Amino acid sequence: MAISREQMDRAIDEHFAYEAKDDVEGVLRTLSAEARHDIVGWPGGPTRGRENARSFYQAMFADLADGKVVCTERLYGEDFLVDESVWKGNAPGRPFGLEGKGRPLEFRLLHVLQFTPDGQIGRESVWVDLAAIIRQLPPA
C-alpha cells in the first residue's frame, strides 16, 4: 500500500530532527519495530529491529556534534524515498574511526528509506561520502 510523499517527507524530516537533537529515543521511535538498519561500511554491520540500531546512534551522537542536514534532492517511489543530503557540523569524537579533534566536517549522505503502511521507517540504508570525511580528518 502506497503512502504519500508528504507522509514520507514528514517521517524523514522527523527522523533528521531527532538526529539534530542527539535524541536516540526519538530517532528509534521513527523506525518500525522490525526495521532493517544499514549504514554501509559501519563496523557493526546491518541490524534488524529498532533496538539493535541503538548502538549506532549512540556512537554517532558521541562522534558528531552540531549537525545540520540539508536535503539536495529526493526521489520517490510507492513506498520508498531516496534522499540525497549534505551533513555539516563538527567532529568531537572519532567518526568512522578517524580523530575528529572538534574539527568542522561536511559530507554527502544518501539515504534509501522504505516505509511501512503506517508511515514508519521499515528500512534505512545509508551511504556516506567517506572520501570527503578522510580528506577533512586525515589520519595522523
Image (tube, rainbow, N blue to C red):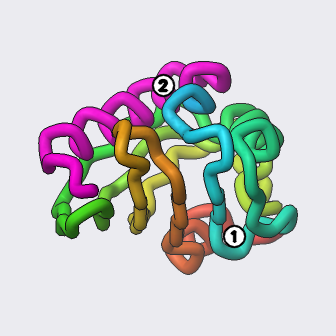
Identify the secondary structure beneath mark 1: loop
Q: Can residue 63 be seen in this view?
A: no
Instruction: Let me know if residue 122 is in the magenta part.
Output: no
Instruction: Let me know if residue 7 is in the magenta part.
Output: yes
Give the image quarter of residue 86: bottom left
Q: Which secondary structure is most common in the magenta stretch?
A: helix
Residue 84: x, y in percent?
29, 64
Residue 138: x, y in percent?
69, 70
Residue 27: x, y in percent?
56, 30
Residue located at (18% from left, 59% from top): 72
Instruction: Looking at the image, tell me whether mark 2 or mark 1 is earlier in sequence order.
Output: 2
Residue closest to the far bottom: 131
The residue to which callout 1 is attached is 138
Q: Which of 15 and 88 is in front in this view?
A: 15
Magenta residue span:
1-26
The residue to which callout 2 is attached is 18
